[in-house]
Image (tube, rainbow, N blue to C red):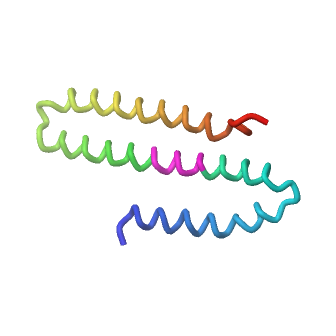
Amino acid sequence: MNKLAKVFVLAAVVILATAPAAWAQESGSQTLIEFSGAFGAALVVIGAAYGIGRLASAAVESMARQPEVAGTIQVAMIIAAALIEGFTFYALFICQTQNPFGG
């Protein structure tokens, strides 16, 4: 089983372990909205970490193959990682909004 499949299995186990507690609350839909925001935030962080990890891995491998362009590769890697993190912060902000649809 590859790493991505293991991450999805772990996420499914966490969801199945926490779902009964979230659905057992009396407030109903408000609890589900809060749970969905936390779940979305978790997926965003997992995806960003996976993406930046793959980016760094490919950059280091490229630098090892062509040491003469290591500076250029490093600058491109830092810019790409900053873009990924910027999107991650935006997505976390959206996920943590209590009720983005009003009401």
Q: Position of residue 19 (x, y in %)?
A: 70, 65
Left or right of residue 69, residue 98 in this image: right
* Magenta segment includes 42: yes
The N terminus, quarter of image: bottom left
Secondary structure mainly formed by the magenta segment: helix
| Magenta part of the chain | 40-48
- Residue at 73%, 48% in the rendered image: 34
Give percent across and percent down for residue 47.
46, 48
Residue appearing at x 55%, y 37% in the figure: 91
The magenta stretch spans residue 47: yes
**Residue farthest bottom in this picture:** 1
Q: In percent of the image, x 11 and y 31: which residue is there?
A: 68
| Quarter of image, res 69 | top left
The correct choice, above or below, for 96 with respect to 20 in the image is above
Q: Observer-nearest residue: 82 or 62?
A: 82
Q: Answer left or right for 43 relative to 38.
A: left
Q: Is residue 4 above or below residue 64?
A: below
Counting labels gives: 0
Q: Residue at x 54, y 33 (%)?
A: 89
The percent position of residue 87, horizontal first and vertical second, equals: 48, 33
Split into 4 quadrants, where in the image is the C terminus? top right
Residue 42, compared with residue 73, is above or below; it is: below
Residue placed most toward the observer, 54 or 41: 41
Query: Where, by quadrant of the figure, is residue 13 drawn?
Result: bottom right
Place of residue 58 in the rendered image (x, y in percent of width and height, measured from the top left): 25, 45
